[in-house]
Amino acid sequence: MDRLDLNLTSELDGLRLELERSSTPSILAVEQASKIAALSTYSTLGFDYGYTLETRIHDKYVQNEPFKEMDQIQELLLALLKDPANQELQQRLDLLLVK
């Protein structure tokens, strides 16, 4: 289980870095979000936002639309690396991802 949890946080960080490179999600960002969703199902970290995150990333990719307020998105992803179960952080991130 520890390895699964480590993989989840690693993929979250990878997604953060990919979005730092470009605010318009690439296919790599979509793939990482998909891995996060799958890992979140079995993780013990309590990260319940995986499938919603995957949907948000995929929607922006399909629309070829950049995320706004990337600085705040980056900060929230960093905060979630430290506290993946934090529902408030997940909700704040969701609000930014749908803008």
Image (tube, helix red, strand yellow):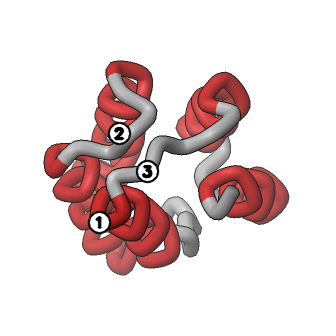
- State the image coordinates of residue 87 (x, y, percent, origin top left): 77, 64
Task: Give me the residue at 34% from left, 20% from top.
Answer: 21
The residue located at (79%, 54%) in the rendering is: 92
- What amino acid does circle 2 point to? Leu
Secondary structure, mark 3, is: loop
Badge 2 crowding class, 10 Å Cα cut-off, few under 14, some 14 to 19, many 20 or more, is many
Q: Secondary structure at mark 2?
A: helix
Left or right position of 53 against 29: right
Residue matched to label 1: 62
Distance between mark 3 and mark 1 Cα atoms: 8 Å
The residue at 27%/73% (across/down) is: 38
Label 1 crowd bin: few (<14), some (14–19), many (20+), radius 10 Å: few
Mark 1 or mark 2, whichever is nearer to me: 1
Which residue corresponds to mark 3?
65
Query: Which residue position is annotated with label 2?
Result: 15
Mark 3 in CB contact with mark 1 (< 8 angstroms) = no
> In which quadrant of the rendered image does the C terminus lie?
bottom right
Cα distance between the residues tagged 1 and 2:
17 Å
* The image quarter in which residue 85 lies: bottom right
Q: Residue at x 55, y 70 (%)?
A: 49
The reply to whether residue 1 is in sight is no
- SS of the residue at dot 1? helix
Name above or below for residue 36 compared with residue 24: below
Residue type at tag 1: Val
**Could you give the CA–CA distance between mark 2 and mark 3, rounded to whole angstroms?**
16 Å
